[in-house]
Image: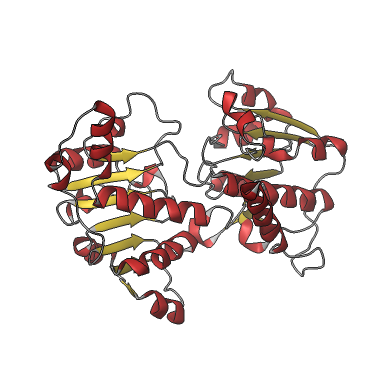
Amino acid sequence: MAMKQAATAAIRAFSSSVPSQSSPLVRHLHASAGSKKIVGVFYKANEYAAMNPNFVGCVEGSLGIREWLESQGHQYIVTDDKEGLNCELEKHIPDLHVLITTPFHPAYVTAERIKKAKNLELLLTAGIGSDHVDLNAAAAAGLTVAEVTGSNVVSVAEDELMRILILVRNFLPGHHQVIKGEWNVAGIAHRAYDLEGKTIGTVGAGRIGKLLLQRLKPFNCNLLYHDRLKIDPELEKQIGAKFEEDMDAMLPKCDVLVINTPLTDKTRGLFNKERIAKCKKGVLIVNNARGAIMDTEAVVDACNSGHIGGYSGDVWNPQPAPKDHPWRYMPNQAMTPHISGTTIDAQLRYAAGVKDMLDRYFKGQDFPAQNYIVKEGELAPQYR
């Protein structure tokens, strides 16, 4: 009950931060009138769906908006089947008006799909990160692309801190020993360290990056960050983080490197063989941003050689990751499926954000400005 009350409080707090209808942001979106066909693409929960009434981010939960949408005369179709010409999603592309998907089970919205979607007006991401959409094609087609900015930043930052500790303390080999009935302290301790005194660098210091730096401060680390924008001077002073204008100059200083930059044309493949070679030997890398920021084979080779001492994250390229994805089998990895931003608390927040934007869309009102990724043919600054 306490967890449910906390989750309810979180969703109310998130909703209350959204500008009111009298906000100066309000304008006509020129949405066509009448009933809308809305398609949601989420992961299936199967037997887990009934285990938590707040599990709304799955097919079965459908963001908790089905009754609300259908009571207003809209059609709401939800599926997890998103790949290939014969998938369920493809059947609805020609006549859907709104497509909702998540980074955790993304429907890849290609230029070809956009061309087929003659009625499409709005693409919503239930969460953060809209790189599954061909944003340039969406802009050219006059579509609106938006996400629930801020909805799961705490969730991801907490997860990153956990992964840093898992790698630094060499936790997983010890856990595996317990499962196998083994007991070999030396097999763990020979590469287990304290976090205190280590140099942690983040590539990207936006909402998630700043939260991570704040959470690292009590560990008495040396904190570095690289971003296109500097953190507010007062916050930078409070955190004790140092701005590094040259990312390549920052890399060899870091014992732990965290990737917190969005996937764009500029960051795709950013960490290739040459850039990884600039990192300190034995560097620990955490990447909860996007898998495609890393060169897949370069990461594998560096883990095999020991140049990367440990790699952890929940993002892959593509997603879901195929069974033969090489990151599954490289040494010293602590990978998981894409889970960091889809905690129950995060689901409630991004479900509330999606409902709010749909309500505004139906009424011809603007969204909160920070939610726009593509608006009136223009991409948000972080995606340019």
Give coordinates of residue 132: x percent, y percent: 52, 41
146 or 65, which lies in front? 65
Give coordinates of residue 331: x percent, y percent: 21, 36
Q: Is residue 231 left or right of residue 69?
A: left
Give coordinates of residue 251: x percent, y percent: 23, 61
Q: Is residue 381 left or right of residue 12?
A: left
Q: How is the image coloured?
A: secondary structure
Q: Is residue 291 left or right of residue 155?
A: left
User: Farthest residue toward the top?
Assistant: 86
Is the residue 233 above or below the residue 73 in the image?
below
Residue drawn at the location 36% of the way across and 24% of the way down: 323
Q: Is residue 75 left or right of residue 7?
A: right
Q: Is residue 334 visible?
A: yes
84 or 14, which lies in front? 14
Residue drawn at the location 14% of the way across and 40% of the way down: 187
Q: How many marks overall?
A: 0
Residue drawn at the location 15% of the way across and 37% of the way down: 184
33 or 80, which lies in front? 80
Quadrant in the rendering for residue 186: top left
Q: Is residue 377 visible?
A: no
Give coordinates of residue 177: x percent, y percent: 23, 33
